[in-house]
Amino acid sequence: MTRYLLVLSVLVLNQFSVVSQTFNGSIKDQQTGLPIPFSSIYILDLEIGLIADSSGNFTSSNSLPSQIKAKFSAVGYESKVLSIQLPTSNYSVFLEERHLEFDEIIVSNNQGAKQRNNSIHIETRKLSDLNTIPTTHIGEAISNIPGVYSSSTGTGISKPVIRGSQGIRVVTLLNGLRIENQQWGGDHGMGITELGIGSVEVIKGPSSLLYGADALGGVIYFIDEPYAGVNSQVLNLKTQFESVSLGTKNQLMYKVARKNYRLSVGGLFTDHADYQVPSKQYAQNSRFSDRSAKLAFGTNKKNWSMHVRYNFSNSRVGIPGHTHDSIINTADFQVDDQSRQRTVPAQVFFNHYLSIENKFFFKRHELTLLGGQTFNRLKEFEEKLTIPALSTDLHNSLYSIKLKSQLTESISIVSGYQGMIQYNVNDKKTEEQLIPDALTIDNGLFSIAYLEKGNWNWQGGIRYDIRSLQSLSVFKGVDPLKRNYQGFNYSFGVVRTGEKQTVRMNLSSGYRAPHLSELLANGFHHGALRYEIGSTTLKSEKANQVDVTYEFHGEHLSIVVNPFASLLTDYVYLNPTDSLIESLPVFEYKQIDKAYSYGIDLGWHYHPHFAHWLHLENSFSHVAIEGRDGFNVALIPQTRISTLVKASFEMKTKVRLEQFTVQHIYYFKQDRIAAFETPSPAYQVVNLGLQGKITGKVPLEIKMGVKNLLNARYIDHLSRLKNIDLPFPGRNYYISLNYQIIYKSKSKSKSNEKVN
Amino acid sequence: MKKSISLLALALVASSFLSSCKKNQCSACHYDKNGAEVELGEKCGDDLEAIEASGYNDGGTVYEVHCSEH
């Protein structure tokens, strides 16, 4: 036995390669062969960033495994992702000059490949691009992505809606950690602030293969900003002011990276008073504040890397529309005085997210172990300032093990096991409980194969999940429930990538077990301004989707056409009724055997050759969900056309204007409505923005402009304040300042090398 | 320079958290008696929590106390 163990140990250890692999080289322009100064190298699996020197040369002093995947990029060039065998010296990378950057590296799909070679259509955006016109909330920022909308309660709560699905049907991940924060509630926010978030990836449609139960409508995957480059420190201070709510947002991030460790730490504080509506009155009790903190630590040694990430957030959000009157006068909710004082009703959230990820790199394999713990506390204050009417805690322990194997040059397989143990417990001292104490256990096994052959990339996988759901007490007269739900899911996709055109097709499925709130609800949900009634007869809902994408990548023009269609089986929906209980509308959870979801996302980006300073971007999003016999599902987003015109300037003055932006968003009327739902008229919003810089040793970036320039009065179809006729904010002036110091150590000498 | 950046960062992070710590919350309170509001003045911190929890005793009758503008 000992002999076998010894042989096994030798075999395993043999997989590891020599310590401190040499990796140096240069990055050059493909056409001219000239070096590209200060270009970036990012080693994907280890999350290590390097910056080339003024001659385009780079050297890594880190301990690296024998094979790495690295992204090489520079401003004005198309980035490249390359798999590199180490050790290697004088490694030359040639980048092609590009006016348009087409696609980023996709993190969420395990492959670390560029979107163009990915068989699933994934939208990836830098948060900075989504905030060209700064947004109040991260949920509002991601609604700038085609096909993604926001369902809001005032300006403080914003939930993502993907292809008409929201809440439990959308899974949110933060660096691979699944975020559970009572998202079943229409008024419970995302639980994530923009602090330290660098980019977001959105998978539209069912995605249970990679993310398990509930990923029926889509997945939102937030990715932290990269750590500082090796041997450098970054200090970043951002502040933002919005006139409409006298709102401030202040953020500070500090990052440091040395040879074998990287650390990022930061805090964010946001505070908004009641916002002003176009009539110059104020939306009563729309005030909110957020506090959040973040810590990320990464290290690597030999063929191992570890990332520890912790996020904390605490929000207090006022709920507009509260009244004790049996007959509602909607004018009462718009008042003459603006306030930011704490009042009721209000929701208070506390979120703690901790994840520890370990990766082990072998010659042809990569093993990832991820463990996480999340905690969400939701308190609702209704009549008392200090005593909550409802307080509930959600503890979630998550674990996953994933093995990526490169079987041949062109075939790889990712297999894994994921699970979570979720415990929901109510504070028994409070007068209200929305859901019972409950224990939910998920476990799932999956395997996905990837094949790359010439211009073709194929992907296919299967997954089996089981969810055990158990309520732990009698709840509103219903005995404790115990249910098991199973899901068998698949995904199959193929993409053909040509020089200028990409065609992609993907078939995927998803499943979602009914949530306790859908099974057992029977009471007021003040935050959502409705009375909800559940049904214990609900079954799991399932979805099967076909999604096709055509992309054109010209030198000055890019086009994306993305139609989709889904068959939804046993679809659960919240149906408005004609009843009111204590002035709140009554909604019932219902299920139909079949519903169909279909739509299209279109986009184009034109960058004319004769005017390289001009960028024209346009997107169109349409979705419908309907059953047989003209049945329509409630709360489906309005069809939208979004246009962004950006003019960039290259000034050499000390105070420089860099960009002028005009954004126009037109929402078509929504008259495909459910029974007892009211239609929403068309509306349009125009936003203007200026971006500039005061140069110097440490430059100051400035953004200023106006949102809702025309002071339009509008209420989005997905707004939960629609039934009290409370419009969105009126004309809103903003200013945002961003101050960043990058300090890079050069061997033993000190210099403030580069400031962005 | 390196030390000063680190110190500045730490100071700013600390001040950011200190400035956002929960203040001693105060609010004007009242109770309803015979259809009229009876003001109790401003209550803060533990006093505020106590009066919201136990109500106000007026001549042997305990009235529910409200301490917000809603």
Image (cartoon, coloured by chain):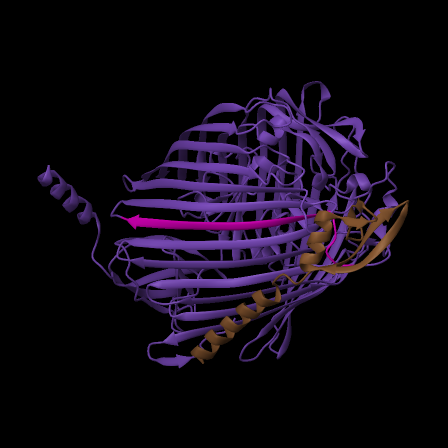
Chain colours: A purple, B brown
Q: Is A89 located above or below residue A474 in the figure? A: below
- Residue sitting farthest toward the front: B60
Q: Is residue A638 in view?
A: no
Residue at image point 35% right, 59% down: A299
Task: Residue A185: name its quadrant.
Answer: top right
Residue A250's quadrant in the figure? bottom right
Of residues A170 and A521, the one drawn nearer to the viewer in this rendering: A521
Q: Residue at x 33, y 76 (%)?
A: A747
Q: Which residues are magenta?
A: A339-361
In depth, the one of B17 and A185 nearer the eye is B17
Q: Residue at x 35, y 40 (%)?
A: A402
**Furthest residue in direction left, as rendered:** A3
What percent of the width, then of the height, locates residue A494?
A: 44, 35
The reply, left or right, for residue A144 in relation to residue A415 is: right
Residue A718 is situated, as x and y percent measured from the top left of the image, at 71, 40
Task: Assess whether residue A356 is covered by the magenta stretch.
Answer: yes
Closer to the camera, A498 or A540? A540
Q: Is residue A474 shown left or right of residue A208? A: right
- Considering depth in this image, is B2 or A684 the residue closer to the camera? B2
Left or right of A103 on screen, residue A186: right
Q: Is residue A279 above or below residue A641?
A: below
Q: Is residue A14 visible?
A: yes
Give the quadrant of the N terminus of chain B.
Answer: bottom left
The secondary structure making up most of the magenta span is strand
Q: Is residue A198 on the magenta stretch?
A: no
